[in-house]
Image (cartoon, rainbow, N blue to C red):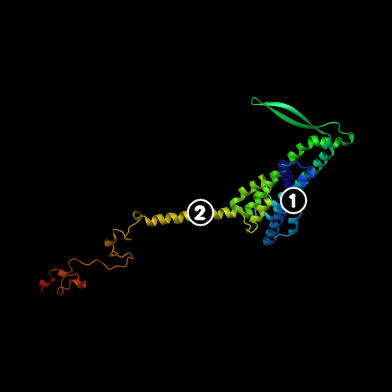
Amino acid sequence: MDFFKYASVVSEFSNSAMWVQFLIGGLCFAIVFVFQAIALFVIASREGYNHKWMAFIPFMNTYYIGVCSQKNKFYTIDTKIIGLIAAIVEFLVFSLYVLYFSAISLVLDYEVSIKTTETFFGKDYTVTMYELANVPERLNWAAWIYDNMHHILNVGNVGFTILKIILLISFFRTYACRRAVLFTFTSIIFPIQGILFFVVCRNKGVNYSEYMRAEQAKIYRMYQQQQQQNFDQNPYNRNPYNRTPYDDFNGTGGNSNGGGSAPEDPFGDLGGNGGNGGSGNNGSPFDDFKN
C-alpha cells in the first residue's frame, strides 16, 4: 500500500507521465521495504521465530509483523491473526488499485476537463472537473471503474488503516514501549514504518503489561525511598538522642540498648558498715550508732 502513497507524493510535485510517477514511487518504496525486511529478519532471528523468509515477501511481511508482535495481544486476539487479516485486506486493496489504474490508462484519452466558477466567501474560484466523453462501448467496464472505484478504494483504505494501526501498536509496544504511540502514528502519516522498524530492531521484545507493572513498581519504590529520606532528615520526626524521656526511670541509665546499671543511691555515702554505702549495702545512716 505504501507503494501508491509514494507514487501519489511524486504526482504532487511532478506532472510527469504516470509510469514515471510509479517508477520513482517504486524506488522509494523498495528502499523502505528493504529496511523493514532486514529489521523483521533480525527480530525473528533473535526471538527464535520460524519462517524468517516471509519478511522479504510483499504482503507476507505484513503477516510477519503480527508474528513478531505476538508477545502482546490486542485484548484477547493473537496478533498473528490480525496480521493475517491485514495481509489479506492489503492484497485485495492493492489488486483493486492495479485494476483502477489499468482502467484509467485505457480511458485516459477520452478524459475531458470541464471548468466551472464557484464562489467561496465572496470570491470567485475556477474549479476544474474531469469526466469521460465518447468512450467506446468495449471500454464501458473501464469507464465504470473510472467513475466508481475510488469509493470502494476509500472503504478498503479505511479498513486496512484500522488493522494497520492495531498491528503497529502491538509491534511498537513490543520493541519500543516508551514511543509506541508516537512511532505508530508517524508510520501512518508518513510511509516510513520500515525505517522505524530498523531503528528498534535491536531492542529485546517485552510484554507491555509486564513492562508497565515493572515501571509502576519502580516508581513506587522511588517514592518510598524519597519518603524515608525525608523522614530521616527531619529532626522533628524523632528523638535526636535515640532515647525516650522515661529511660532514667526504667533502669536503662540512658543506654539506648537498655542494658545499663541501676541508678546510684543518693544516700549511699551515709550507709552503714563502715561508711561503705558506695559498696551497694544499702544500710541505715544510724547503723554506726548501734551497739
Q: Quadrant of the C terminus?
A: bottom left
Can I make out residue 51 in this image? no
Left or right, 106 with reference to 175: right
Left or right, 99 with reference to 259: right
**Callout 1 crowding tier (Cα within 10 Å): few <14, some 14–19, many ≥20:** some
- Pointer 1 and pointer 2: residues touching (CB < 8 Å)? no
Q: Residue at x 63, y 49 (%)?
A: 183
Mark 1 or mark 2, which has the lower sequence index?
1
Q: Residue at x 13, y 71 (%)?
A: 287
Q: Position of residue 119 (x, y in %)?
A: 68, 25
Q: Residue at x 17, y 73 (%)?
A: 276
User: Residues under labels 1 and 2: Cα distance?
Assistant: 47 Å
Above-or-below relation of 126 to 236: above
Residue with the most extreme top position: 122
Q: Nearer the viewer, residue 205 or 27?
A: 27
Q: Position of residue 146 (x, y in %)?
A: 80, 36
Q: Nearer the viewer, residue 114 or 260?
A: 114
**Callout 2 crowding tier (Cα within 10 Å): few <14, some 14–19, many ≥20:** few
Can I make out residue 187 in this image? yes
Does dot 2 land on a helix, a strand or a loop? helix
Amino acid type for the residue under numbered disc 2: Ile
Q: Position of residue 164 (x, y in %)?
A: 69, 47
Above-or-below relation of 151 to 208: above
Q: Position of residue 57 (x, y in %)?
A: 76, 54
Q: Can you identify the residue that label 2 sits on?
A: 219
Q: Quadrant of residue 42?
A: bottom right
Amino acid type for the residue under numbered disc 1: Leu
Q: Can you identify the residue that label 1 sits on?
A: 27
Above-or-below relation of 138 to 23: above
Left or right, 288 with reference to 96: left
In this rendering, the label closer to the viewer, 1 or 2: 1
Does dot 1 land on a helix, a strand or a loop? helix
